[in-house]
Each structure stands twice: as structure tokens, then as C-alpha cells.
Image (tube, rainbow, N blue to C red):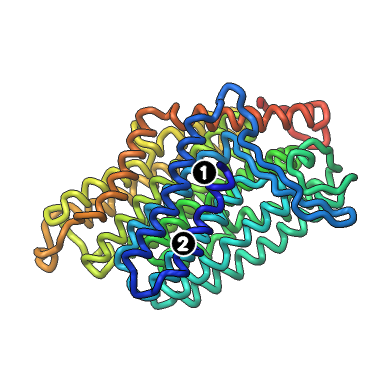
Amino acid sequence: MLSAIIFLPLLGAGLVALVPSERRTMIRWLAGIFAGLPLLLGLILYGSYDVHAGGLQYVERVSWVTLPEIGVSYFVGVDGLSLPLIVLTALLTLVAILASERITERAKEYYLLLLILQTGVTGVFAAWDFFLFFLFWEVELVPMYLLIGIWGGPRREYAAIKFVIYTLAGSALMLVGILALYFYGTPHTFDMTVLARRSYGPAFASVVFWLLFAGFAVKLPVFPLHTWLPDAHVEAPTAVSVLLAGVLLKMGGYGMLRVLVGLLPEATRHWALLLAILAVVSVLYGACVSMVQRDLKAMVAYSSISHMGYVLLGVAAFTSISLSGAAIQLFTHGLITGLLFLLVGALYDRAHTRLIPEFSGIAKRQPLLAVLFTIGGLASLGLPSLAGFIAEFTVFIGSFAVLPVFTVLAAAGIVLTAGYLLWMLRRVYFGPLAPRWERLEDVRGVEVIPLVTLTALIILVGIEPSLLTNVINAGVASLTTSVAAAHPPGALGWIGLPGRPW
């Protein structure tokens, strides 16, 4: 079933390629079916995942590449960290397809690339062989480059090339780190479960840590490796921005949790102070820059940099609670930022502008859009009873005992987030209606479905977070238990930091 979730979109892409280009409706329906089937299967896996047993489940393992002294396996499985992200990937891909109704130019190629992108990202979250992990990591690069470069805005070529350069640079360093882990011990292996049980020298672990961190930090992104993100978001089509912020950024956070914490815990703890500094800078920088944006899409893009800083803070604190908070933040941010980009796209399709100063009082003409935008904004700033609150609250609770000063500084990001989001809502939707918007239309028809679906999930997770946290906590518990067993506290003396609670 897990292989079906990974490769059904790829099969759908092959079928879409066979349909004549002029049959756009059939192409869109076919893409929607092959994005929706993995979502259905993912929900079945999610509902049947044994949270009491935890650990790796639904494992599929087959020898794939067998050469002298080189063994690569098709090794996939899910645990409490990866399963929610697999479901999120399928959900947001289906949402992106539903939101792509206005794509008419080269529609076949557009939907084909969306499905290939889904396979690549899902494979990253399911892979437990480092070779397979890196292969899937690189698969998403080409479709995202083409989606931005062909269907993007006026500066699409610049944004697409910048995205590729940053990602390839990070991937090259990550590959060196993967090869170093492969050759370090005997027998040589790409198996993550085996690599996690090995002990590494302090100097070696630190070097490999930064090589791997570079690849994950570019994708997250972490300041100062973030500059590709605003350009990519502003130029990308709405649906592509949903996937870029809702799914692709999560690959970086997942890599930090799965690889840095799971395989190199000593190095992660050793560099915790520097990680915490980068986290706080990302949170505050992203929030401050968001406050001065005139473009709605740029504002949401910079807010993603700020919110991903909370993920890095959770990793730096290195407690079971903070790690759970980081994992929860990955999922909830995907829902919230996906909704916000859809809302910005719906507004732009009707107003043909995203500049905040040009709007005023349009809630009178777009009441549904105004309500949904308000809910999305309040969720982003962490209002209790909405999905953003449980993630940020858990990160702060888990981090404060270990990094109190950095946690307080990061918490100030909530105040800044409230400032720019509420300021935006007041200027755009409330106040007197500007005369030029007297005939502005509200969202309706099929376009409402993805908006209402994401909003409902944001409210559901906010009211009943255990639907998400029970699974994620099981994943974090198995991760930290295996790390503690392989690397007992007594072996961490070289770090020079006091012991921290698991």
C-alpha cells in the first residue's frame, strides 16, 4: 500500500501524457483521481497506524542495486514523523489540482509535473535507504523548476534558476555527507536504521552534521539561506506556491528530525546554541520583513521563513516535547500557509493586484473570502483553538526549560506576526469600500471546496489536536528512545553541555 501511495501519481502522470492536449477537462480529472487515491490510501494507513507500538510500520524492503561492496535497497516505511507528512502531501497536491482551474496553457504538462512532484516528495518521507532518500530528494527539483519557469510571473526565469542553484548547492553538500556516513563504518550501508545505531567520532560527526544541515537548511529555509524563497513564491502560480510552502519546505524540517537528530544526536546537541541563534534570527527576521511588504504573496512567503524558525528552535532544544512541537509545526504550517496562498490567489484572480495599499473594505464584496482570510490569519498568529496554537505552544514548552532566553525571543515573533496579519486584514478587508472594488466578486463554485476543506482541518486540529499529536508523539518517542539507546548520556561528555531531558 505504501508503494501505491508513492507511485500512483507517477502512473497518473504517464496516463496524462497519453491524453490529447486539447482535452483539458479529462486531463484535470485524471490528475485529480491519481492525486486523490494516494490521499485515500494515506488516510487508511493513518487510521490503522498502531500508536501504542510506534516505530517503523508498513515496511517494504527489496534488494535493488547489488554491486561489489555496494548494496542499495528499496526500503520504505512510515512512522509517526513521516505518516502525517505523507497525508499532507497528498492532500495539498489534490488541493493544488482543484485550484488550477485557470491553467489553460500547456495544461497537460502542468498536471503531469504536479503528479511527478507528488511522487518525489512522498518518496522522501517514506524512504529509509539514504540512496533512495537522495534520489527522491532530487526528483522534485525538475518539476518545481519547470512549474515556476513556465507558468510563473514576469520574473519566473530568474526565480526558477535561483531556486535550482540554491537547491543544487545544498544537495551537493548533503550528498558528500551521505557518502561520508556510507564509507565511515563496515559493512558500508545506506540503511538509515543501521547508521542510526553507529557511533561517530566528534570531529567526523560535526563535519557531516554541517554538510547535511546545509541541504536541509536551504530547503527549510534558514536565514541566511532563505533568499530564493520569496522570489519563487512571488513568481510561482498559486497552486505551485501552495505545494512549495506547504510541502517542499517540510522536507528540510523532516530531514533535520530524521537525519540530524536520529543519526547524529551528539553533533546536534553540540551545535544546539548556534542552531538556536539561527532559529531566533529566522523567526524575527521573517516577521519583521513581513511587516513591510506591500505584496500579499511576499508577506505570506516571508511569514513562512519566520514560522519555520520554530521548527529549528524545537530541534535545537532537543527535548521530546520540543521535537514533537517541531513535527506538529511542519504539519499545521502546511495547512495554514496552503490556505493563505489559495486565498491570495483567489483575490488576485478577481482584483488583478496583490498590493495591500490598493485595497480597502472589500469584505463588503467578498464576505466568504474575508471570513476565511481572517481564520487563516488568526491560525498563523497562533490563536488558541486553531491549528497554529498547539504547534507553537508545544515548541515553547519544550524549549523554555533548556533555552529560556531564545524561547522568549522567539515568542516575540508571535507579537510581530499578530501585528502584520491584523494590519493586513484591517487594510484589505475592513474600513470604507474603495469605489474601484464595487463590482468585485466573491469565491464560488468548485473554488470554495479546497478553501473550506483546509479551513475545516485547521479548526479540527485546533479543537482536537490529539488526532495529530498521538501519532507524532509515537514517532518522536521511538526516535528519541533509539537515540538514547545507541548514545547513552554518559557518552556525550565531549559536548560540554549539561544533560538534557529526552
Rate crowding at label 1 as few (under 14), some (14 to 19) or many (20 or more) other CA atoms within 10 Å: many
Q: Which quadrant would residue 500 be assigned to in this image?
A: top right
Q: How far apart are labels 1 and 2 at the CA level?
A: 17 Å
Q: Is residue 464 above or below residue 72?
A: above
Quadrant (top left, top right, bottom left, bottom right) of the N terminus: top right
Q: Residue 176 in the image: state x and y as whole percent.
A: 77, 59
Q: Residue 260 in the image: state x and y as whole percent.
A: 69, 44
Q: Is residue 27 above or below residue 195?
A: below
Amino acid at pointer 1: Leu
Examine the rendering and report whether any part of residue 381 can be seen.
yes
Q: Secondary structure at mark 2?
A: helix
Q: What residue do we see at 59% from left, 47% from top?
A: 3
Label of residue 85 in the image: 1
Examine the rendering and report whether any part of residue 290 can be seen.
no
Which comes before the other along the chain, label 1 or label 2?
1
Q: Is residue 276 above or below residue 107?
A: above
Q: Residue 207 in the image: state x and y as whole percent.
A: 79, 52
Amino acid at pointer 2: Leu
Q: Nearer the viewer, residue 75 or 197?
A: 75
Q: Is residue 189 left or right of residue 417?
A: right
Q: Is residue 242 left or right of residue 499?
A: left
Q: What residue do we see at 39% from left, 62% from top?
A: 298
Q: Nearer the viewer, mark 1 or mark 2?
A: 2
Q: Residue 69 in the image: state x and y as whole percent.
A: 89, 53
Quadrant (top left, top right, bottom left, bottom right) of the C terminus: top right
Q: Which quadrant would residue 202 be assigned to in this image?
A: top right
Residue position for label 2? 114
Label of residue 125 in the image: none
Q: Secondary structure at mark 1?
A: helix
Rate crowding at label 2 as few (under 14), some (14 to 19) or many (20 or more) other CA atoms within 10 Å: many
